[in-house]
Structure formats: C-alpha cells, structure tokens
Image (cartoon, rainbow, N blue to C red):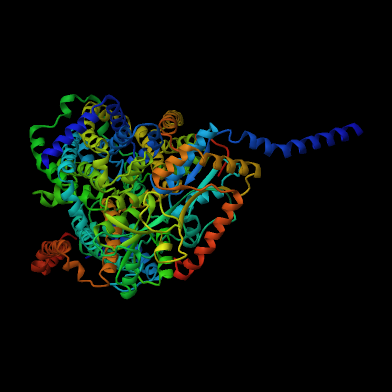
Amino acid sequence: MIFTALQDLWFGFGVALEPHNLMWCFVGVLVGNMVGVLPGMGPLATISILLPLTFGIKPVGAILMLGGVMYGAQYGGAICSILLNLPCHPPHAVTCLDGYPLTKQGKGGVALGLTVMASFVGASWGITEMIFLSPILVKVAMEFGAAEICSLMLLGLLAGSTLARGSPIKGVAMTVLGLLLGIVGTDVNSGVQRFTYGAMGLADGIELVALALGLFGIAEFMNSINQSTEINTTYSHVRLRDMRPSKAELKRSFFPMIRGTLAGSLCALIPGTGPTIASFVAYATEKKVSRTPERFGTGMIEGVVCPEAATHSSVQGDFIPTMSLGIPGDAVMALLLGALMIQGIVPGPQLISEHPDIFWGLVASFWIGNILLVLLNVPLIGIWVKLLSIPYKYLYPSALFFVCIGVYAANNDMFQVGETLIIGILGYVLLRLGFHPAPILLGFVLGPRFEENFRRALLLARGDIGTFVERPISAVFVALSVLLIAVQIYVRLGPYLRNGMKTKAARIAERSAAE
Amino acid sequence: MAHRLTFKRDYYAGGLIILFGLVAAIQGPEYSMGTLVRMGPGYMPTALGIILIALGLMIAGSALITPGGADEGFLPADPQWKGWACILAGPLLFVLCGQFGLLPGSFACVFVSALGDRTATWKSALILASVVSAFGVVLFSYFLQVPMPVLTWSIP
Amino acid sequence: MHLMRTVGRAVAAAAFLVGSLAPAAAAEAYPSRPVRLMVGFAAGGGADIGGRILAAALTERWGQTMVVENRTGAGGMIAAELVAHAAPDGYTLVACSSNHVFAPHLYKHLTFDPIKDFEPISASATLPNILVVHKTLPYRTLGELIADAKAHPGKLTYGSSGIGASLHLTMELFKTMAGVDIVHVPYKGGSASLADVIAGHTDMMFGNATEQVGAVKSGQVRALGVSSLTRHPALPDVPTIAEAGVPGFEVVTWYGVCAPRGVPTPILDKLNADMVAAMATETYRRRCAEQGILPAPMSRPEYAAFIEAQSEKWTPLIKRLGIQPE
C-alpha cells in the first residue's frame, strides 16, 4: 500500500510541477499568505472572493490555487499575532499569549523565524498523514459519535480553562463566560433563538472573528494607547543575525513542535474541530507538560511554536475527510468542495480513482506550496519586523481600519463590525478587572459543541446517561476529565486543607502587625 | 485594624461575573428547561448562569481575604478618556459612514481614531487617514473585490 | 402670459410622455451596470452554486455582469431583508430558495413581508431530496423501511440540517404521510448530518440531491427513494417515494430569483424573458446536469403561484410541528 501511495505521489508531483499548475499554486499561496496577514480576512473570505475566478480555470489549477490560499493564509496569520498582539484569525489567538511578550523582549524576529519552521513541520506531518494514513484515520473518525465528541470537549474545556496566566478561578470564569457567549444564537437541537432578543444579526450567533478581534484587538488598543512603547526603538536597527534563533532556542522548540503537530492532526480528524481548537489544545497541553508552566505568557518559545505547528498540521489534515469522503469538515472545506462541484467534479471516495490527477496533484502541491511559503516568508520577516518601527500612533489607527474591514469582509455583514466594537469594550473592562480574555475564545468554541453533542448523544441513547461511559472512547475521555478535576482540587486545596486555618490566622496576624 | 472596604478591584470583578450569571440564570428558564437527560434550550444557560454566580462570589470573596495590592484601581493611573473615545469611535464611524461607501467609512475610522493619540495633530491624522483609506480602497475594493461600494449616495 | 401657460402645458405634457416612456426605455437599457444577486447562504453550498450558474448564464447573455454576493445568516433572511429594503431599480435581486417559504416561520422579528415585499421573477432550478439509509441497515426498498418503522415506532433515527430547514420538513411530511414515527436528530448543516449517517450514528436522512449523489454512488449510503415525482437522472434505479410506497408524496427544493417590490414591470418582464432564455442555453443545461439539478423556467405568474402553493403546502405542517421558537 505504501508503495502504491509513493507511486501515486510521484505521479502527483508530475502534475503539480506542470508550469500551468505550478503557477496557480504559487498564486494561491501568495494571495493566501498576504491576505492572511490582514486581520479578519481569513481563508474563507479570500476563497469566496476567488471562487468566480475558478470558473475559467481547469479543475486541477483551480483546486491547487484554492488549497494554496487555505494553508498559505495560516502562514500569514501568525505575523500580526506575534508582532502586534492582534490575531489575524482565531487560530492564532493563542500565539499572541507568548508571541507578543517575545516581541516586547526584542525577540519578535526570532519568534517569527521559529514559527515558519514550526509551520513547515506541522504542515509536512499533516501531508504525510494524508497520504499514508487516510483510510485508517477516516475509520477512527467515524467511531467518534456525539458522546465521544462531547466527552472530548469536556476534557478540552477543563484542560484549557487554566490556559492563561493569573488566578485560576478567573480563568474558569472566563471559560464559562465564553460558553455563555457561544450559546447566543439559534439552538441546534430545538430551533429556539437564545439571547438574540430579536436581532437577526445574532440569529447565527456571535461571529468568532468579531469576538477574537474585539477581545484581542480593540481591547488591546485601548490598553496601549498613549502608553510609552519601547518596542519601536529596538527595531530600528535589526540585523539578519538577530532574527536567527539560537541553538538553544532551536533545541527547546523541537519537542513542542512535535507535540503541537500531533495535537493538530488529532483535531483534524475529529469532525467539527478545526485549527482554532487545535491551537488551544496544543497550547494547554504544552503548558501542562512543561516544567515551568507559570512562565507561559511571559514569552516562552514553546508557547509559540506549539500552537502554530498544531494549526498547520490541523489545516492540512482537514483535507482528509473532505477529499476522501466528500464531507467537508468546516465552512472553508465546503467552499473548496463547492468549487470542485462547479467544475463538475464530485468529491468522495471515487475522487481518487476517477480523478487521480486532482487528488495526488493536490497532495503534491501541498508540499510544493509549503516550500514556496517558507522561501517567501523567511526573507519577509525582516520587513514585517521593520513594521514595528512605525510609531504606534500611526500603527493602531491603521490596524483598527484593517480590523473593521476584515470583520466586514468575513461575512459581508456590517452588524458584525458593531459586535466587534461592543466586545472590544467588554474586553477592555475585563482586562482592567484582572481577567484575561483568552479562555473566552476557548469556551466560545468548545462550549456550543459540548452542549450540542451532549444533547444529541442523549437523544441517540434515548435518555440513557450511561452512554458516556458505556462507549469505550468516550469513557476514556470522561475518566481523564475526572482525573483532571481531582488533580486540580488536590493541588489547589491541598495546602489549604492541611494548613488552612493556620495560614488565614497568620495572614490576619500579618495585617494587624502592619497596621 | 482598619477595614479598608474601599474600592477593591476584585469586588467589581466578581460583581461583573455575578451580573452575567444573573442575566443567564434569569433569562434561561424562559426557554424551556427540560431535564438533564432531555435538555431543553434553557437548561445550559441557567446552569452556566448559576456557575457564574458562584464563581463571581468566590472572586469577590477572595478580595476579602487577601490584602490589597498595588494597581488595584479599575481605571489605570492615567485614564485615557479621549484616547478610548477615539478608538471606539473608529469602528462606530466605520459602520455609520460605511453606509456611504468604503472610502468615507475608512477615512472616518482612521481619522478619528488617530486623533486619540496624545501627540497627534489634525494634519498628521488627516494624512494618515488619506493614505490608509486610499491604500485600503485599492487593496480591498479592487484587488480583493470585497462587495462594498467605494462611494455611494444611496442609503440602503 | 397666455404664452407662458401654453408653454407650461406643453412642457408638462412632454414630461409626462417622457416619464411614461422612461421605464420602457430603461427596460431597453437594462441592465446598464452590474446587477447584484444576493445569496443568503454560504458560498459553495447548493443555493450558492445554483445562483452562480444562473449568474454566469445571464452575464453571458447580457454582456453586463451579474455579481453574486453572499450575505449569510438567519436561513437566508438577512439577504432577503437587504433586498426587500433595496432600491427598486432592478439592480439588486435575491436568490430565493425553498427556505424563503420556511424561514419566516422561524424568525419572528422580520422587518419585511416575505411574500408581499417581493416580486417573483422565475425559478431557476429544482432538485429533489433523496432518502438515504446507513449502508449496514437491512432495508433494500422503501417498503421494508416503512414496515419496520411502523412495527417499532421510535426505534429509528434520522438526521437533518437543522430545525425548520427543508430537510427536516421533508422528513416530517414523510412521517405524516407514511404514518411512521422516527426520532429527529438535528445537525448544523447537511454535511454534518450526512457524516453521521455514513458512520452509522443515525439511521437515515433526507438529503439534498447535490450533496448526496456522490455518497450514494460510492456506496457509502443506500438511497431508497427520491422526493420528486420523477426519477433523478443521476440515479435512475432509485424509485420516487410516490411510486415506492407513499403515493402523492412530492417535495422539491427549488431555487429562484425575486426582486424587491416596486421594480417597474417592464424591467421585471425583461428579467423573466432573459432568465428563461438563459436557462434554455446548452451551457446552463449542462452545468445543471453536472450538479444534478433541473432547470425550471417559469413565467412570472407561474412562479408567483408556485411560491404561494408551496407556502400553503408547508405552513400547516410547520404550525402543527409547533416550530414557534419564541
């Protein structure tokens, strides 16, 4: 089987390297990369815009281009997250947490360089997976029913609620708030509109891009305006040498990259989990396995490379169910499928046999495209970094404009720009009260899926709540969740339970001594 | 021992969370609740609301036990009212002026938000707004074909 | 003075004449700039592709582009609202679909009337829904399925693309007419539902022909019937539900174009004529066949009657199901 796969791959390279197709691939990755840098404009918006173009191109070229936009956009997305603390697109929100502090330390270029590397590693694994492991992975994915997804979401919520720095209670509160915000909209299981108060713009829920850009963008602008920023001066004289990561940094990044990649590929398989969840899960896992978890959020390299590797591996992996089953994993894949269908090609298991040039050409083009992106991005790092030397007073209004147009372009909906504004205000208030907004995104993304699948699992099991532990995969996740809670309780309350009274008394004594 | 029950950030933090929780817990039951195994649309919001209220109480409660620290004020030491107003006016004007097209919307957004900076002048904001909106129109309208008219007189 | 009055009257008469000719003249010149077709669903989906195929055909015919703009949300109602409030000059149209009849029952606070605020132009395509079952289930014919479902009410489950969406309502109509009880499991969208039928988590679903044909042909699911009155060209071996066990059952998903109320009649007529002509072209027919949809040219009164008939057909069922969210 592997041999035939290699043969097909060779054939695919032949297709992808044809000058005509190569050109379309290049156009795709270039446009995707450039647009990916713009906040809010993700692959979805870009592909919708390019879709009419594909009418006139042959199918192979069209799909190569659109695919290129998809993963190319992910390369661009990390840039603003690291340099400006502004996630261009939700999967890169976690990258801000450690990326921006790195920039403040003058290491923005290093972070970018490592990101490109992590992206390539993640993507390469995703591609390999797609080639050799598709059939097995698809089978595994089919085993994931509603109960399994629900338990997994629960695990993710528990693991990720202590994602950001600061008080864990506040972290949990933010996660729960995110869950609540995710509930706004139409309920899948009953059709009831919740918390929309009649506003049609909210009927489909709060837009994720609006949430991410409001919380991380507008709130951040409000936080930074008129504060003195030393970053700008550091970057006026940047040499190429400064942007290269040191050997130690490379070594530190190795395992996080691997772990991130694995997290990403797992998330790619499970229906309904996309790059955003993958990046959060990878970050949370990395923080949990690290020996110095409290330093996450201050500029840990691991916290940057891990989610980025996860994002890229997840994006490449997302193609698997789409190409092999004909079932799109998310809206972007649905678009890709639509583009294929407009060309008269029906995706599904027969795609590989009926149109091997498309399938294998696409797979081969992934690698070519990623290499092109690395070649494109590395020299550009210097330019992006120079961006930082623009005085903040010119930078933030421009960024604000990009945020507005980006959110608008996501769904051609001005209402969502208004959403971004309100969320921005909320985000700033939360920042001032000592909350960190990152877990809101986690709760927002995982929460609705948890509820949807919880109710669906019970529906399918006719009300038997034992279904969550009777089904083996689900039981594993539930057990892990329980374990996680137990560990948390032990770690947090243990000292108090043992020395509780004493500590409190000691503190009161301290206070009265100080008065 | 003087009880400094004056402003403590975590009171307000907890209070905000309790507020969210109350909204959810009160609105939730209006959508039918159902039971745990036959959940209605209102079950989850109510449950989450109650959890939030509990968390909010814990946060406010923790403010009671721990002594106050530095930077406890809700507003930063140097409140930037003008700056914030300008930043918030940006997207607002984008929405309002954007009814007339991308050009007025982007110009208004950049111009007003740029004025928020202490060192900004009318001239610098004007130049920045012109440059950015011109660039934006070229990039978004011509290259990316975002469906928004550049300039229009009709209000839909 | 006398002269002034005569001149005044002449000018008024001339203005009146020109004014009455203007719409006709405008119709001759229509379209003189790009026409926007608002599609209320995501790009790449069935309604969007249907709209794009039509837009391409009309663009070719006119020499002026028809631009497709996606404004997703609220089951297509956001796009509909936009067009209902748009300037009635014929340059902003909406791509309506079956959802146009269903969605108003789900969204209570509409700022427009989905029937009265629009002028129907013509339908552009129709497609049936296909009843598919998970491949390991033992039913080979629709009759077997109905028999088993009758014997064990509540045992089987079916997926749908969402409450109040056409796939949900199709199955509910089927349940009513066949007299069976099957448990509804709603999903967010047809493909999510299809994924679970393929995996076997749910037993069956009614699916959009465009989405299902691939899965049926590759054997991932088994098709037991199509919901239209005639067999689907891409699946000639699959009987219609009407002939296989539920006489009189007919559901079609349809796409069409409507304009806001107030667009001058000459323009409406020209649009209709152009659409019908575009739908007769070889390219349009070929593209539709590739998607598994059938061109459906109609005259304006025919389309208006069609929409009204659909509304009358579905409203009682929707009301009986109690899909009143708020």
Q: On the image, which quarter does residue A47 sit in?
A: top left
Is residue A194 visible to us here? no
Q: Nearer the viewer, residue C295 or B133?
A: C295
Between B131 and A158, the residue placed more toward the observer is A158
* Left or right relative to C246: residue A299: left
- How many numbered markers are drawn? 0
At 30% across and 43% down in the image, what residue appears?
A89
Quarter of the figure that contains the N terminus of chain A:
top left
Position of residue A388 measured from the top left corner of the image (x, y, whole percent): 28, 31
Q: Is A163 on the left-hand or right-hand side of C113? A: left
Q: Position of residue C146 (x, y in %)?
A: 35, 69
Image coordinates of residue C183 in percent, x first then y, are 33, 69
* Residue A42: quadrant of the picture: top left
Residue C86 shows in this picture: yes
Q: Residue A443 lies in what quarter of the image?
A: bottom left
Of residues C201 and A249, which is closer to you in this image?
C201
Residue C87 spot, x, y in % from top left? 59, 44
